[in-house]
Amino acid sequence: MVGTSKSIITLACLALLAFGSSTAALAGDLDGHSSALAGWTGMVTFDNGSGLAGYVDYAVFTKADFISEFGTGDFSPVDGVVYTYQVFNTGTDAISAKIVGNTAEANSVGWFDALTDGDRIPDNSFFDSGNPTWLFIPNQILAGESSVGLAFTSPYLPTTGGGLVIDGGGLVAVMGLPTPGSVQIPEPASWLLASTGIAAFGWFRRRRR
């Protein structure tokens, strides 16, 4: 009886380990990235109920941090904020496009192949009426595959928005993705000026006491 109990416990532990491994496998490099802007890294899922399903990992970086982490071999940022995404296909339909809704100025859309997983490179990337768009035709993201890193830059800090994932005949909204907002990232000179002003104000207050 003791031997049977030990066997059951051992099998239960192995099952938990297997479950933990499969759960951990869902996390790509962008989800929880330590160099991302605080609060702007994570993962959102999508499912249209007809075979178009998966998740999108995302992370928003400053230009300097993106270059430090991924270099400029495939994608060279222009503006100060870099929006990055990676699409994973867990459904049965092949994914043919990824579109991010954009509410502010954006530039330099492209891709980078510096992530652990990344099966499919987009055939084309461009701005469609201001929306960053990556096409995977005919190089579709098949079931069980993922895209390389998808990126664009903007001078504006992120807000919560959404986008679309498309297969050959359907689409699904993906809500909770970072998109450019209305607040522009301060230039380095502005940061320095603000910091100097704060320091001077503190010194002035101490002198008056």
Image (spheres, grey):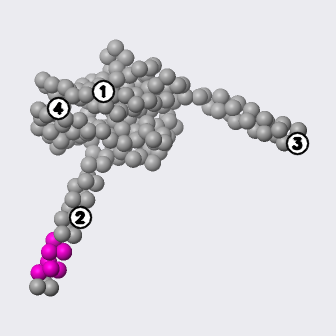
* Residue type for callout 3: Arg
- Against 28, is 52 above or below? above
Q: Position of residue 93 (x, y in %)?
A: 12, 34
Determine the CA span between mark 4 and mark 1: 14 Å
Determine the CA span between mark 4 and mark 2: 31 Å
Q: Residue at image x 34%, y 23%? A: 101
Determine the CA span between mark 1 and mark 3: 55 Å
Q: Residues within 10 Å of mark 4 (few under 14, many from 20)?
A: some
**Nearer to the camera, 37 or 146:** 37
Query: In terms of sequence position, does the residue under pointer 1 or pointer 3 come before the other?
Result: 1
* Residue type for callout 2: Leu
Query: What range of the chain is rendered magenta?
Result: 4-11
Determine the CA span between mark 3 and mark 2: 63 Å
- Secondary structure of the magenta portion, mostly? helix
Query: In terms of sequence position, does the residue under pointer 3 or pointer 4 come before the other?
Result: 4
Query: Which disc, if any, is residue 6?
Result: none
Q: Position of residue 174 (x, y in %)?
A: 28, 31
**Nearer to the camera, 62 or 11:** 11
127 sits left or right of 164 in the view = right
Q: Position of residue 180 (x, y in %)?
A: 44, 26
SS state under label 1: strand
The N terminus, quarter of image: bottom left
